[in-house]
Amino acid sequence: MNPRIVLATRLFPPEVGAAAFRLKALVTALQSTGASVTVMTTVPPNGGRSERGISRWPVLRDRGGNVRGYVQYLSFDLPLFFRLILSRADVIVSEPPPTTGLIVAVSSWVRRRPYVYYAADVWTDAVIAMGASAPVVSVMRWIEGVALRNASHVLAISDGVADQLPQFGVSPDRVIVVGNGIDTEVFSPNGPRVLPGHPYFVYTGTMSEWQGAEVFIEALKLLEDDTDVRLYFLGQGASETKLRELAEEVVPGRVIFGGVKSPEETASWIRGAAAALVSIVPGKGYDFAKPTKIYAAAACGTPVIYAGAGECATMVADNHLGESVDYEPSLVAEAMRRFLAGQDGNSESRIDWVRRNASLRTAGERAAAAVLAAQPA
């Protein structure tokens, strides 16, 4: 009998996001082995058609259309408990947030079946980075710990994430590093590119507190001899309002917020940019993160300017993906000037590196193998 897998996630295509793409790759890989997969997810913001194997539930969303925030999470998690209790499955796969992992853990205990937790990041560290109060951090650490410790396997998207898991009492032999990546068919050097009539830099994806994208707005202000240069933010996030206010204050009219774009549209903007921008505020406990936007840019052949420290800085520098600089506006501005002057000759090598090291298809296949290995004997 073919294994029955249920994936519990608040985010899945047609919604846009790194998690949605990663989980789609997992489902595709599982189905290629003959597994029967049911995705328990949400009704997308603009509705959607009925799809075989996808069970959608209406949820609360914030003003940006996101399932982000405790109330929004609960609107998905509480009904999910009963959906899982009534489902037939051999293995459950849980995507963050940890509240979803807790629901999966409890329902799996009730039904006496294994589950796999997909650790794309460490939420407790993110809460600390956002300056949350001690009680909030303690509650998040407990919830995340329960979700992680009770999983048959924990899938980590990087060695950096895997290294954070022992703090929750997770045995290393249950952690499997499956990697992460990008769809190299969509994000490639071949395809249309946006040419708005002026040079520009592009920041794609989530704008959160721990990413600190304001460093790029401050750097743009320092390009006093290049006032025609623009900065495009394509995505959304908790810091968007703050970034808009800062942009209007220091470089009015030079920063454009374009909202969420499809992967194809995003790729066209990346291809036309002088460089793609990625940042992580150092010292906030998130230096181990590897944002997918790095892979997306490099796969298109576009150089990355990474502002921060940690694993990303080493990865970008060692593999000629662009330039790594300290999280400092003046250093970012210097890197911007170099790329505006066309000082980049590594396009082909970075495209090749992504194909060899950051293929989403390969990551999905590794994750699928780990999920199938969790089946009861």
Image (spheres, grey):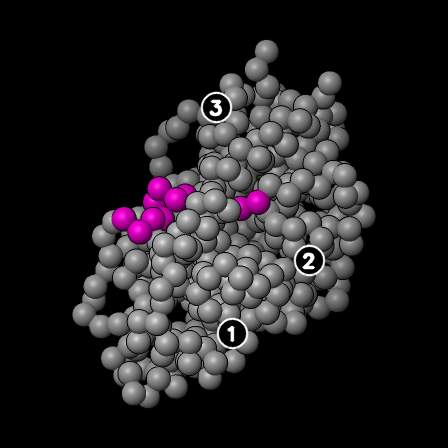
Q: Nearer the viewer, residue 311 or 27?
A: 311
The residue at which mark 3 appears reads as: 32
Q: Nearer the viewer, residue 353 or 163?
A: 353
Q: Quadrant of the N terminus?
A: top right
**Which residue type carries mark 1?**
Val
Query: Residue at the location (76% across, 39% down)?
Result: 173
Circle nearer the N terminus (3, 2): 3
Query: Residue at the location (57% across, 53% down)?
Result: 71
Q: Nearer the viewer, residue 345 or 30?
A: 345
**C-alpha span from label 3 to label 1:** 42 Å
- For residue 314, which quarter of the picture? bottom right
- In the image, is residue 186 part of the stretch drawn in magenta? yes
Residue 30 screen position, x and y as percent: 52, 27
Circle nearer the N terminus (3, 1): 3
**Which residue type carries mark 3?**
Ser
Q: Which residues are magenta?
A: 179-190
The residue at which mark 2 appears reads as: 124
Residue 37 screen position, x and y as percent: 52, 25
Secondary structure of the magenta portion, mostly? loop
Instruction: Examine the rendered structure and indicate whether residue 30 appears above or below residue 45.
Output: above
**Which residue type carries mark 2?**
Thr
Position of residue 311 in the picture relative to residue 243 (left or right): right
Tag 2 secondary structure: helix
Q: For the residue carrying disc 1, how many other residues have a C-alpha within 10 Å: few (<14), some (14-19), or many (20+)?
A: many
The residue at which mark 1 appears reads as: 325
Query: Residue at the location (70% across, 36% down)?
Result: 153
Count of marks overlaid on the render = 3
Residue 52 screen position, x and y as percent: 42, 24
Instruction: Examine the rendered structure and indicate whether residue 46 appears above or below residue 274.
Output: above
- For residue 155, which quarter of the picture? top right
